[in-house]
């Protein structure tokens, strides 16, 4: 039974890239096969997670790793680990973090609404610095010394959102935090490609780093990775795994959870709503392996050729101004049509049959940005036709 029959929902043409709102990326046949294999057997989930974690550790250079239900879930779990360490009593109390280290420091310019995941641990977010470079009133952003000065007995972690323009530089932040033995957790959800970024943030001193599995890695949409220090990942696992088990019968894999260090087992933790299924673990590790094994320049060439094909098609439209941008991590096409403003064009594309979605971040400049990553075979022709249909209707 197909989804279009059962739910009567049709696929869209996704030229916006692997965004969550438009269902993330496309999975390869191998990833789909791995999920199907896992779906038709049962496993001990902790064993699957420990094995996946050791692969993630090899790939990231971190001591340990874990599969999450997304980068956002990774932030929640990672911050919970920084607050409780390996104390099962503290784990059981969250999100009541009173009496624990219950503050997380964040450069003010890194604030964004994914930090709901951080705040839901019950901590207080402490914003540091003023980024007057954004308001045009100055040249500076938060500086590492300001983070260091904000650290107190209450500080559980420093949170950092990685981005090409992020300030202060991560190595300065980790150095400042580590002087007072405070861990740094990095949101690197969308920082792939390049695949070298899988190792980069750990190499720059991050204690935990979170990636999305459903963006360019090409894993299941509801997956992610958290990698970092063994003890923190162990705490992540303890607050995430289903704990409906007798302590005497509980034999978690030692490289993930060292039972001898615990006075008792915590119950279901704050991360339990962020459940990860066997299919997600199987799909994510398969996608991750394919992502790192693939030739980075061939992947880029593939996207570039799609982008050039789109641009050639769009240039046939009267009064279209089309540019290929191949500077960033992912090449893209920018199009502006003189006779139709950007917002109208986007609305018409969305309402088109098939529905077309694109990146609207520059729509106020009447420019629409097209990303090649989630286009399927045959989509380029349909995409170009849709632009022709909506730019000069009737
Ligand atoms: C996409 C994104 C997230 C959320 O990632 P999920 O894997 O969807 O949970 C968090 N932070 C940033 C900066 C992102 O771009």
Image: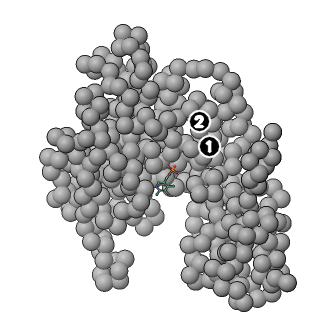
Q: Is label 1 in a helix, a strand or a loop?
A: loop
Label 2–label 1 contact, CB within 8 A:
yes
Residue that label 2 marks? 280
Q: Which sits earlier in the primary sequence, circle 2 or circle 1?
A: 1
* In-image side of 12 versus 359 (left or right): right
Residue in the image at 25% along x and 41% along y: 96
Residue 141 or 266: which is nearer the viewer? Answer: 266
Q: In which quarter of the image is residue 116?
A: bottom left
Residue in the image at 40% along x and 47% along y: 75
Above or below for 99 versus 192? above
Residue 122, numbered circle: none
**Residue placed farthest to the top in the image?**
248
Above or below for 270 versus 254? below
Q: Is label 2 in a helix, a strand or a loop?
A: helix
Residue that label 1 marks? 219
Of the two numbered discs 2 and 1 in the rendering, the one whose residue sits closer to the viewer: 2
Crowd tier of the residue under label 2, counting other residues whose Cα lies within 10 Å: few below 14, some 14–19, many 20 or above: many
Where does the image place residue 58, in percent across and percent down from the top left?
49, 34
**Residue placed farthest to the left in the image?**
153
Residue 294 or 44: which is nearer the viewer? Answer: 44
Residue 43 or 181: which is nearer the viewer? Answer: 43
Where does the image place residue 189, in percent across and percent down from the top left?
49, 52
One can see residue 82 in this view: no
């Amino acid at each position: 039974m197909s989804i279009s029959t059962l739910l009567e929902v049709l696929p869209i043409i996704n030229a916006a890239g692997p965004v969550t709102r438009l269902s993330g990326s496309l999975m390869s046949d191998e990833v789909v096969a791995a999920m199907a294999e896992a779906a038709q057997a049962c496993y001990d989930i902790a064993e699957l997670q420990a094995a996946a974690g050791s692969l993630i550790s090899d790939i990231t250079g971190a001591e340990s790793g874990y599969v999450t239900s997304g980068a956002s879930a990774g932030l929640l779990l990672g911050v919970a680990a920084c607050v409780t360490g390996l104390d099962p009593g503290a784990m059981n109390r969250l999100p009541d973090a009173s009496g624990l280290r219950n503050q997380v420091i964040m450069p003010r310019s890194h604030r964004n609404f994914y930090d709901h995941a951080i705040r839901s641990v019950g901590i207080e977010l402490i914003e540091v610095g003023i980024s007057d470079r954004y308001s045009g009133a100055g040249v500076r952003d938060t500086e590492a010394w300001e983070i260091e000065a904000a650290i107190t007995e209450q500080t559980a972690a420093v949170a950092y959102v990685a981005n090409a323009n992020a300030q202060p530089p991560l190595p300065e932040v980790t150095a400042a935090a580590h002087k007072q033995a405070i861990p740094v957790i990095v949101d690197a959800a969308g920082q792939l490609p390049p695949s070298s970024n899988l190792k980069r943030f750990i190499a720059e001193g991050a204690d935990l780093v979170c990636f999305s599995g459903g963006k360019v890695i090409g894993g299941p949409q509801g997956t992610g990775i958290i990698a970092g220090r063994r003890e923190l990942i162990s705490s992540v696992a303890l607050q995430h795994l289903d704990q409906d088990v007798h302590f005497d019968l509980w034999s978690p894999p030692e490289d993930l959870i060292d039972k001898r260090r615990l006075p008792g087992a915590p119950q279901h933790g704050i991360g339990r709503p962020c459940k990860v299924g066997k299919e997600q673990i199987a799909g994510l590790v398969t996608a991750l392996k394919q992502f790192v094994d693939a030739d980075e320049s061939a992947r880029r060439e593939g996207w570039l050729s799609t982008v050039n094909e789109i641009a050639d098609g769009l240039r046939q439209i009267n009064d279209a101004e089309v540019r290929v941008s191949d500077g960033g991590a992912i090449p893209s096409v920018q199009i502006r049509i003189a006779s139709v403003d950007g917002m109208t064009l986007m609305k018409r594309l969305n309402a088109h049959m098939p529905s077309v979605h694109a990146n609207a971040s520059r729509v106020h400049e009447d420019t629409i940005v097209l990303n090649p990553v989630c286009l399927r075979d045959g989509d380029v022709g349909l995409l170009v036709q849709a632009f022709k249909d909506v730019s000069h209707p009737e």
